[in-house]
C-alpha cells in the first residue's frame, strides 16, 4: 500500500528511537522526536498528534507494510523492540519490491551511456547487484570499495540539506594539526568525495571570512544556525572548481601548473589505464619509456600520489615540484640508513646487528 512521505519520516524516526537502547522511550518522547523530524525534513511546525504516533506504531507492528516490527511496552510505559537487532531498514525486499526495483534499474540503465548521466553507472550497478543477491539468495557478485569505519558520514545529509536550503551551520571542528577543537559558523557550498573521504567546501564566518575545505571526519558537532545570515557564493564556479585539482586541497587564487613525469614501459600501463588526472596526456614515447603531463595545482595530494610510485617514476617539471619530491625521498631514506632496531629484528626472527 502507498505511504505518504510524512508517515515514512515518522516510521523511520520511531525506528531510530527504538534502536537506541541506551534510553527509555515513552509515547511522549516518540511524539516529540517525530515532531522534530518533520520540522527538520519538511518544515512542518504544528507537531504530531498522539493518535498519529499510536497509529504509526500499530502500522509498524502489522504486516501491511511488511515491517511486523516487534514493538513491546515495558512497565506499561516504555516502548522498545523485543529483538535488539531489529530495524525496519533490515527487512528483506518483497517480490513486488524486487519487481519495481528491476524496472527502475532497467530505466536507469538507458541513461548510462549519456555524458550527463555518467554518475548513474555505479548506482545502477549497485542496485542490480542488490536485486540479484535478494532474488537468488546468493552472495553479491560485485564488491564495491567501502570502509565501514569511516568517520563523519553521519554529517553528510545535514550538510546536503543546508546547502539546498542555504542554511548556516555551526560546526565544532578539530584539524589534525590543532590541539583544541574550534567552533564557528560556516556557509556550505559543495560536498566533495575523494577516495572514500568526504569534504565540504564553504565560507567560514570567522574574521577575514576564509574559504575552507573541511574534512567531515574531523567534525565533532554540527547544528543549524538560523540566526546567522547565509553568505552566498558570489565568485566560485562550483561546477569547475576542482577541475584543476588532484584531491581536494586548493587555495583561492592558486594557479595550476604543467607537471611532466617519466615512467618506463613496464609501469606506464598502470597510469595509461588509470590516468592520474583528466588532463593527462602522453608527451613522448620512445624505447626508454613514456613521458606524461598533467595540468594541476601543486598540493599535498599531488605530492602523495607521485611519491606513491616510488622509484617507478621520475618528475621532469616543474623545478619546484622536483625539489619538493627529492627532499621527501631524501628524508625517507634516513629511516633506512639508521638500520632496523634490534627489537624489531628479534620479533621477526632476525639476528640483531
Image (cartoon, rainbow, N blue to C red):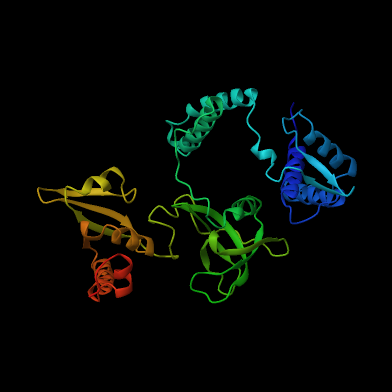
Residue 89 appears left or right of 310? right
Q: Quadrant of the N terminus?
A: top right
The image shows residue 255 at horizontal and vertical percentages of 36, 63
Pick the front one: 226 or 98: 98
Q: Is residue 193 above or below residue 117?
A: below
The image shows residue 334 at horizontal and vertical percentages of 26, 74
At a point 52% along the width and 69% down the height, the residue shown is 175
Residue 251 appears left or right of 45? left
Residue 115 appears left or right of 21? left
At a point 29% along the width and 62% down the height, the residue shown is 307
Q: Is residue 42 above or below residue 179?
A: above
The image shows residue 10 at horizontal and vertical percentages of 77, 42
Pick the front one: 237 or 163: 163
Pick the front one: 11 or 35: 11
At a point 80% along the width and 54% down the height, the residue shown is 24
Residue 153 appears left or right of 247? right
The image shows residue 227 at horizontal and vertical percentages of 73, 64
At a point 25% along the width and 53% down the height, the residue shown is 293
Q: Quadrant of the C terminus?
A: bottom left
Amino acid at each position: 500500500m502507498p505511504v505518504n512521505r510524512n508517515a515514512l519520516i515518522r516510521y523511520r524516526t520511531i525506528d531510530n528511537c527504538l534502536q537506541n537502547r541506551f534510553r527509555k522511550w515513552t509515547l511522549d518522547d516518540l511524539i516529540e522526536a517525530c515532531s522534530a523530524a518533520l520540522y527538520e525534513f519538511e518544515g512542518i511546525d504544528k507537531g504530531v498528534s498522539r493518535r498519529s504516533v499510536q497509529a504509526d506504531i500499530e502500522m509498524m507492528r502489522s504486516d501491511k507494510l511488511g515491517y511486523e516490527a516487534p514493538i513491546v511496552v515495558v512497565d506499561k510505559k516504555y516502548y522498545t523492540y523485543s529483538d535488539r537487532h531489529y530495524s525496519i531498514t533490515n527487512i528483506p525486499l518483497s517480490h513486488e519490491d524486487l519487481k519495481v526495483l528491476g524496472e527502475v534499474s532497467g530505466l536507469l540503465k538507458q541513461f548510462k551511456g549519456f555524458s550527463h548521466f555518467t554518475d548513474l553507472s555505479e548506482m545502477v550497478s549497485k542496485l542490480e547487484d542488490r536485486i540479484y543477491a535478494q532474488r537468488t539468495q546468493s552472495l553479491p557478485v560485485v564488491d564495491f570499495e567501502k570502509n565501514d569505519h569511516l568517520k563523519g558520514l553521519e554529517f553528510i545529509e545535514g550538510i546536503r540539506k543546508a546547502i539546498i536550503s542555504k542554511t548556516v551551520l555551526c560546526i565544532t571542528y578539530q584539524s589534525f594539526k590543532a590541539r583544541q577543537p574550534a567552533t564557528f559558523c560556516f556557509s556550505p557550498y559543495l560536498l566533495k568525495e575523494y577516495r572514500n573521504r568526504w569534504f565540504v567546501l564553504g565560507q567560514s564566518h570567522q574574521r577575514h571570512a576564509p574559504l575552507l575545505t573541511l574534512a567531515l571526519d574531523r567534525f565533532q558537532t554540527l547544528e543549524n544556525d538560523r540566526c546567522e545570515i547565509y553568505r552566498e557564493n558570489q565568485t566560485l564556479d562550483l561546477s569547475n572548481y576542482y577541475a584543476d585539482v588532484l584531491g581536494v586541497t586548493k587555495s583561492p587564487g592558486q594557479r595550476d601548473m604543467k607537471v611532466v613525469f617519466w615512467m618506463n614501459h613496464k609501469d606506464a600501463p598502470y597510469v595509461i589505464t588509470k590516468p592520474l588526472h583528466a588532463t593527462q596526456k602522453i608527451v613522448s614515447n620512445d624505447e626508454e619509456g613514456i613521458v606524461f603531463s598533467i595540468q594541476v595545482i601543486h598540493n599535498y595530494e599531488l605530492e602523495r600520489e607521485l611519491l606513491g610510485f616510488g622509484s617507478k617514476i621520475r618528475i621532469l617539471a616543474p623545478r619546484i615540484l622536483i625539489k619538493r619530491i627529492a627532499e621527501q625521498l631524501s628524508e625517507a631514506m634516513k629511516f633506512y640508513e639508521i638500520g632496523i632496531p634490534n627489537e624489531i629484528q628479534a620479533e621477526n626472527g632476525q639476528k640483531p646487528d
